[in-house]
Amino acid sequence: MTSKQIVRAAMTFQRPERLPLDIPLLGLTDYHSANWNQIGTGDVSQKKTLDEWGCVWQRSDVKNMGLVTGHPLDSWDKLAHLRWPDPDDPSLYEGMEERIAAGGDKFIETSIFMVLFERMHALRGFQNTLEDLYLEREKIEMLADRIVEYDLRIIENISSRFPGAIDGIGFTDDWGTELNTFISPALFEEFFAPRYRRIFDACHKAGWLIKLHSCGKVNRFIQPFIDLGLDAMNLQQPRVLGIEEVGAQFAGRMCFVSLCDIQHTLPLKGKADIEEEAALLIDRWGTDNGGFILSDYGDGEAIGVPLEKKRWMLEAFLACDRWAKK
């Protein structure tokens, strides 16, 4: 199997011949990123940057992606002057053809950063967004729909410009604290689910598999995302979620893209604990037909994870790879 086939088989439960990997820092990945020219958080070496939506990102001295501290729509009075980004700008897609071609037989993935909820509160402010869901429903619906339309145009432009060239797309939307989701499942189903469905349907129409990253204890939203057709969730806090709990409810029903817990295990535990957790994740979140992909968090500097621990983790997962050919 090629890397492309291995990732696809894991995500669709078609029995990959080994554990799919996405750990670029260790030189091992079955993925190839072919992104459009989205600014995202901007140049992370700078203390302050501006993204394409006009959100201001601020950073500390510790290397990190930053935090939105300037919300261009923190008052609805600013709506008339908000400069909406143009998803049809040809410059957004310049260089994509070359990036796609460089992927070879790897799983070619594009992405949209802050796909819906995160973009809403980046523009409006977190507290404002939660309040608006109850107090300014018409206005917050308008904002959500404008964001969805932007996402749909990005998806349509990429799929029409590069038909059949993209294998999957990754989204980010953090949905939880370490105790629970930010909103109730009922509000999620009423407000957000129909909008996610439009986005997911467009991706599947293009022939792409879909991965969503979300931080926090988002257990209550896993089933709704399965119902919406999400193919995989990137969950990086398995101890917060509950390894046994998630496995018992959802293994075999959605692919999990994960690793040893980035807060409770990798920064604080030793080799034996990392090995134990890796074996537990493979056993509980994977199935004999697939359903698990090992994916790194990043460079680890911001969470205090030395490279040695990542090597321990990789070795531990490979040692209990239930799919590898004997």
Image (tube, rainbow, N blue to C red):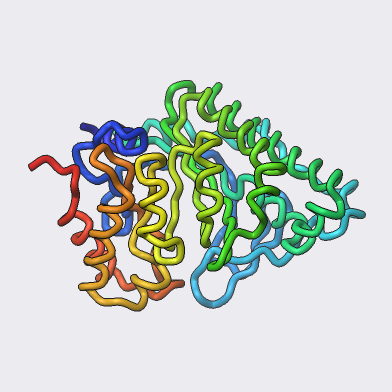
Query: Toward the viewer: 46 or 148?
Result: 148
Estimate the x, y position of residue 135 in percent, counting from the top left: 86, 54
Residue 218 location (% of width, % of height): 53, 56
Report the quarter where the C terminus lies: top left
Q: Can I make out residue 174 in this image? A: yes
Does residue 287 appear to the left or right of 211 in the view shown? left
Quick one: 236 or 93, which is closer to the camera? 236
> Which residue does the image show at 19% across and 37% down from the upper left?
17
| 191 up-or-down from 313: above or below | above
From the viewer's perspective, tell me whether residue 41 is left or right of residue 164.
right
**Looking at the image, how many numbered discs can be counted on the residues?**
0
Q: Nearer the viewer, residue 299 or 149?
A: 149
Name the quadrant containing residue 147.
Answer: top right
User: Residue drawn 39% across and 48% down?
Assistant: 256
Image coordinates of residue 82 in percent, x first then y, are 83, 48
Residue closer to the observer: 77 or 129: 129
Q: Residue at x 24, y 35 (%)?
A: 15
Q: Quadrant of the N terminus?
A: top left
Residue 298 visible in this rendered orientation of the protein: no
Instruction: Find the residue positioned furthest to the left.
Output: 326
Name the image quarter holding residue 71: bottom right
- Name the residue located 28 percent from the left edge and 31 percent from the top edge: 14
Where is residue 181? Give x, y as percent: 60, 59
The image shows residue 294, relative to residue 94, as above or below, that is below
Task: Identify whether 184 is placed above or below 268.
Answer: above
